[in-house]
Image (spheres, grey):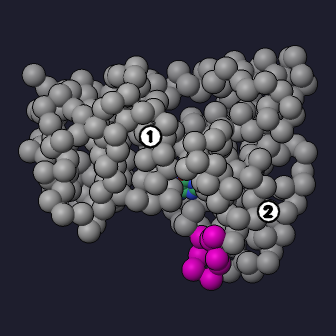
Amino acid sequence: MTAAIIDGKIIAADLRARVAQEVARVQRDHALTPGLAVVLVGSDPASEVYVRSKAKQTRAAGMASFEHALPADVAEADLLALVARLNADPAVHGILVQLPLPKSIDSQKVIAAIDPAKDVDGLNPFNAGRLASGFNALTPCTPLGCIILTKTVHASLEGMNAIVIGRSNLVGRPLVQLLLNENATVTIAHSRSRDLPQLCRQADLVYAAVGRPEMVRGDWIKPGAVVIDVGINRIPGADGKNRLVGDVAYDEALQVAGAITPVPGGVGQMTVACLLVNTVRAACAIKGLPAPAV
Ligand code: GUN
């Protein structure tokens, strides 16, 4: 039997619809229009695509979108000044500075300058620390999406063995914390882990977030496991054009797993949807309203 395919496209569309409902409600009842500011530095083509998609989906959910494009050679002080203006702007409830930033800019400094209440990426050390301490926090969007996808298969993750392969601040580390909050037993694997295939075979839930095309093989997967593939890698295809693959050898894993996310059409769709979730949550918190129903 082949794995069930977890359709990120449908699940993300459903989530966006629920965000739009909550936005309409806070607008009607509290005259609040949640606003998201996205800052793009330079002209990385992949980043431009993401930023455009974020702005479009923000408006489609009924929120205000503020886009700021800065040249690649912008001075760090000017970027910090823009962040300070957005921190002070009452129409802005969420601030996202698209990563990666040019090497001339200290990303950590910029992220730390974002008001934690508006940090819809959840990357500010204040939010990362709160999450790691088990407190309520704005949480990075991709890990949040991974948990939502997993819960479409298993309503409770309690007591399950999860493996997170990759330990980035953007995905691996916050995902570990979210899984702990769900009472899963979590193994954190990375490039120095010994016998990764054997570690992986113990896992009921596999999260691959390393950025290495098709690294996780079918015989690493425990039969029936849920496989969430965070990787987005462009590799040359047989026809000479680039094709998009994940960190999991999909065709192999499909034969063994209980459920699996495709690439594209899996996790990628969820990241922007969760950004909208975080923005409406941030707007309500800033206004002192109860947390939205999403
Ligand atoms: N670049 C790739 N993914 C992300 C993300 O989730 N947030 C930000 N800020 N930049 C990214």
Q: Give the distance between the C-alpha atoms of the residues marked 1 and 2, in whole angstroms.
A: 32 Å
Magenta residues span 101-108
Q: Quadrant of ligand 1?
A: bottom right
Mark 1 highlights which residue? 180
Residue drawn 71% across and 24% down? Answer: 292
For residue 245, side relative to residue 224 (left or right)? right
Q: Give the residue type at disc 2.
A: Val
Mark 2 neighbour class, 10 Å CA radius: few under 14, some 14 to 19, many 20 or more = many
Residue 166 % position (x, y): 35, 57
Residue 73 % position (x, y): 68, 80
Write down the quadrant of residue 139 in the picture.
top right
Mark 2 residue element: helix
Q: Give the residue type at disc 1.
A: Leu
Residue drawn 63% across and 41% down? Answer: 135
- The image quadrant where one finds the C terminus is top right
Mark 2 highlights which residue? 83
Residue drawn 76% across and 48% down? Answer: 118
- The image quadrant where one finds the N terminus is top left
Within 8 Å of ligand 1, the CB of disc 2?
no
Label placed on residue 251: none
Marked residue nearer the N-terminal end (1 or 2): 2
